[in-house]
Amino acid sequence: MLRKFGKLLGQQLCDAFANFEADDTSPVAVLYGVGGSFCSGFDILEMSTDEKEEISVDILMRPEGSVGPTRRQIKKPVVCGINGYCIANGLELALMCDLRVMEESAVLGFFNRRFGVPMLDGGTIRLPAMIGLSRALDLILTGRPVGSQEAHDIGLVNRIVPTGTALGNALELATCLAKFPQRALNHDRNSVYSGAFETSTFHQAVQNEVMYTSREIIEDMQNGIKWFNQTFEADTTHSWLKRDRSMADWDDEEVAAAAAQKEKQKQDEEVARVEADKQKLAEKAQKNSKKTEVKPADSSDQNIDSKEKPKEK
């Protein structure tokens, strides 16, 4: 998985999922973003030139989906490892997956809202079924960023993991699923989806999502991506691309990241302990200083002390 979708990647992903579904030796798939982010949606710069306007519309209207087979249910479980930014129709792709593992520093959001690009990859159907109508409308209409804790709290993701460990945790979760008897697992999975929305209703809803996209909406989208191109044409690294990270040696990197996090936690605990000790010492010193304050002598004591002792003869 790449950070941005070009015009060919969506079809390649459709082909990859078709091969996965036909492969009886592969019970579970894992989807992950190489290069620091899961997916920032379509490469708007590639779609924004005048000669590609019709091509961009054709891509959005693909029967299976613009960023993969998002307009249908995959026949077997898919686990998604979310790192960096997962936005626009990249987030719709993540919603297609059964389980989502999200790094604590990752960010979700329908950032396409600001460019006038409509949601056409099943997000308007899947998201309300996952988190409820009111929350779904909040995220869809505002296009605001969503952090990992909120995403987990509202049921948008299933696991929060340390930064740099999404792939390893997604693979571990997929391995657990693969160990179970698959016929019963897929039977129950299909039953869950049937309960959430009937298959016929889902397909009809997806068709409506596409059919409601008028020519005026397409024109707004084209204006939005033209503006994006004019604004960012000289900038190849946008604000949502957090970092660059190779997939090579991901397991070693995860071990190192986990060790670094554990060491940082240990240091934070030590700092907190030292601060607590300082506070206790300060409180103790304050109490002692109050006890040692010199009190004015009592007048009766002064009278006794002022009396002269009898002289010895």
Image (tube, helix red, strand yellow):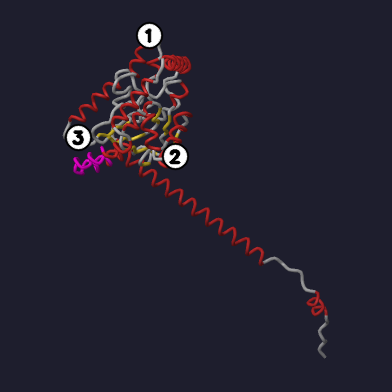
Between discs 3 and 1, the one toward the N terminus:
3
Pick whichever, 192 or 56, lies toward us: 192
Are discs 1 and 2 less than 8 Å apart at CB? Answer: no
Between discs 1 and 2, the one toward the N terminus:
1
Q: CA distance from mark 3 to mark 1?
A: 41 Å
Q: CA distance from mark 1 to mark 2?
A: 41 Å
Name the residue beneath numbered marker 1: 51
Pick whichever, 185 or 172, lies toward us: 185
From the viewer's perspective, is residue 84 above or below residue 47? Answer: below
Q: Is residue 265 magenta?
A: no
Segment colored magenta:
173-190
Q: x, y percentage for residue 248?
A: 28, 32
Q: Residue at x 44, y 15 (%)?
A: 216
User: Identity of the amino acid at label 1?
Assistant: Glu
Mark 1 surroundings within 10 Å by alpha-carbon count, few (fewer than 14), some (14 through 19), many (20 or more)? few
Place residue 40 in its image quadrant: top left
Q: CA distance from mark 2 to mark 3?
A: 33 Å
Pick whichever, 51 or 169, lies toward us: 51
Q: Helix or strand or loop: what does disc 2 sit on?
A: helix
Residue with the most extreme bottom position: 313
Mark 3 surroundings within 10 Å by alpha-carbon count, few (fewer than 14), some (14 through 19), many (20 or more)? few
Left or right of residue 275, residue 93 in this image = left
Mark number, residue 150: 2
The C terminus: image quadrant:
bottom right
Q: Residue at x 21, y 30 (%)?
A: 21
